[in-house]
Amino acid sequence: MIVLKAIGSFFVRIWRWIKETAWVQPLLIVGAIFAIIFSIPYITRWAQSFSGTGSGQFYKQYDISINGEEYQLGEAVTDGDKLAQGLAECNAIAYENPANPTAEPYQDFVQKYGEKFFVVFYKENDSTSDNIEAALKYLSDNWNKKDYAMTISDGKPFKAYAFNTSYVSDNDADFTLTLGGQSAFSRFLYVNSNLFEQAGPALFEAPYRTRASVAESNYDKFALNETDSASTNPLNNFPAPTICLVDFSQAAIEQGRAGLSEVLFTLSGNMDIDRAKLLRDMWNHTDSYSVDNLFTKQA
């Protein structure tokens, strides 16, 4: 009790001094105002984390885990590995025999992951990743709503998987920097390199590449065969963000466009609705970039 009384008396004396010292009060008021101003961004981020509207919050609903990623070529350890390797197996069939109109080779994969979906590789605290995230959220929120010009021509539900390329895995410290080993995503790329090596050349010939004149270097980096002056390791140069469309619908199969069929690295447009329309067109395989339209062009 004596200690508590002493502490209480100390704060009482400070408060009395503040009240009796006129010049201190304006300083405290100004300091309090600045404290509030500087705390606004932190309060906003805190509120957004609860509302699900902050940077990365939408992606997290669709994250697929690469926690515990190992360094064994071709081994399926994480959920991300299993998706990537299943997709690589189906891609191999689809790319090599595009004229075969049967869905049978893809049935197990489709049953587990879905017939059609986006795959996003995003970075934390990255403006381009944030733009894609906002567009995806807008598209998802207004999915197949004609009044919002978000009509989905095949009527399928929105579905996506997201890979956080900035993710810190529980076992990162077990690896050295060799080949980017301390990055879980670099290990994921190494383990599943066959997916990107096979998809890169196929996507290079896709309409979104040829009609949009997307930079060749992004496709080379996506296929894990380009380095730059800052690094000799292609795993460190993967183009994140990247958004892909995987399509094993009957229409895609019959048109020889099954598998990982479209890819974009940025979204043009000044507003979320404009960028969302591009994603809608990507899903529908329509617009001026995809003249071999699988479905009906949307307005």
Image (spheres, grey):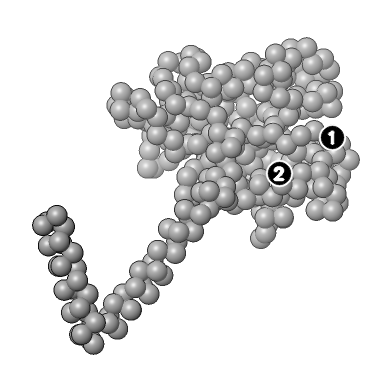
Is the residue marked by circle 1 packed among few (<14), some (14-19), or many (20+) residues within 10 Å?
A: some
Q: Nearer the viewer, mark 2 or mark 1?
A: 2
**Which image quadrant for residue 68?**
top left
Q: Any mark on residue 285, and which?
A: none
Q: Residue at x 80, y 53 (%)?
A: 148
**Which comes sooner in the sequence, label 2 or label 1?**
2
The picture places residue 41, in percent across and down from the top left corner, at 45, 61
Pick the residue in front: 125 or 48. 48
Q: CA distance from mark 2 to mark 1?
A: 15 Å
Q: Residue at x 43, y 23 (%)?
A: 69
In the rendered image of this protein, does residue 295 appear above or below residue 81? below
Q: Mark 1 highlights which residue?
A: 154
The picture places residue 268, in percent across and down from the top left corner, at 66, 53
Name the amino acid type tagged 1: Asp
Look at the numbered disc 1 and give the secondary structure of its residue. loop
Q: Is residue 227 visible?
A: no
Pick the residue in front: 243 or 3. 3
Look at the numbered disc 2 and give the secondary structure of its residue. helix
Task: Name, please, the residue furthest toward the front.
Answer: 1
Name the amino acid type tagged 2: Ser
The picture places residue 95, in percent across and down from the top left corner, at 71, 21
Q: Residue at x 40, y 29 (%)?
A: 169
Q: Mark 2 highlights which residue?
A: 140
**Which image quadrant for residue 2?**
bottom left
In the rendered image of this protein, does residue 246 appear above or below residue 209? above
Relative placement, left or right, of 125 versus 114 is left
